[in-house]
Image: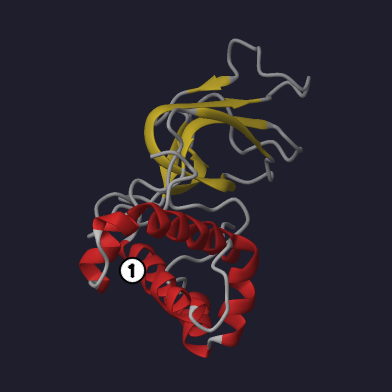
Amino acid sequence: MPLSDAYATAAEYRARVGGSTDGDDALILAQLTAVSRYIDGETAVGRYFTKDAAAVARYADGNGRARVYLPFDIATTTGLVVKCDLDSDNDFDGSDETLTLNPHFWVGPDNAGAGPEAQPFMFLEVVPNNGRLSCWPERRRSLQVTAVSGWPAVPGAIREATIALTRQLRDMEKSGFTLTLQNIDAAVNVSREASYLIRVEAFREFGPNQ
């Protein structure tokens, strides 16, 4: 799923709301997409509930500890490559700087995909006595993580919040609001119900990246 996709489809919207025909799908999808990008802005910096189409290289800072929380989520370990600047030369070309999952590091939380809804991996942890490193170097950009970032699948709470908020804001259009990414924030602030939905219900399960 590309990063720009909506967190719900027009068909899912119509199934919940009713009263719309297939001919409305293009407009509904545009509005669902705008609401989805608004939701992104209300969550932690760098968090989104779709996932990369392919593995992308990103940088992270080390912290001098065995566990480091990443500023992005990892949707799957497929294609995961972690490199660590062990010699402080600001590159990752050393033969021992490409680390291997399980011999050198773990991803966490443990069993992230084992619950009723799969969750992403949020941190890297050094495997004790691995012979390569004992902690993540306390330097900026000392880690290069190539991974499919994001969430394994859109969480049900986020999908339902996207549909519910889109419905409320579509109703508000009748009183003069235009449902665009720029205007959603103003509409949410006017609608106490929408504000509660976004700021409490939709995100209490999804704390910020640490």
Q: Residue at x 68, y 44 (%)?
A: 64
* Mark 1 Cα shell of 10 Å, populated few (<14), some (14-19), many (≥20): some
Residue 117 visible from this viewpoint: no
| Coordinates of residue 100 in the picture (x, y in percent) | 45, 24
| Coordinates of residue 116 in the picture (x, y in percent) | 22, 60
Q: How is the image coloured?
A: secondary structure
| Coordinates of residue 22 in the picture (x, y in percent) | 25, 56
Front residue (pair 120, 184): 184
Instruction: Establish if 23 lies above or below 72.
Output: below
Total labels: the figure holds 1
Left or right side of 127 for 117: left
Instruction: Please name the residue that numbered disc 1 is placed on.
Output: 160
In this view, the residue farthest toward the front is 23
Instruction: Establish if 47 lies above or below 186.
Output: above
Front residue (pair 70, 14): 14
Q: Amino acid at mark 1?
A: Glu
Q: Residue at x 77, y 22 (%)?
A: 90
SS of the residue under disc 1? helix
Quadrant of res 160 = bottom left
| Coordinates of residue 103 in the picture (x, y in percent) | 41, 27
Left or right side of 15 for 182: right
Left or right side of 63 for 83: left
Task: Give the quadrant of the N terminus.
Answer: top left
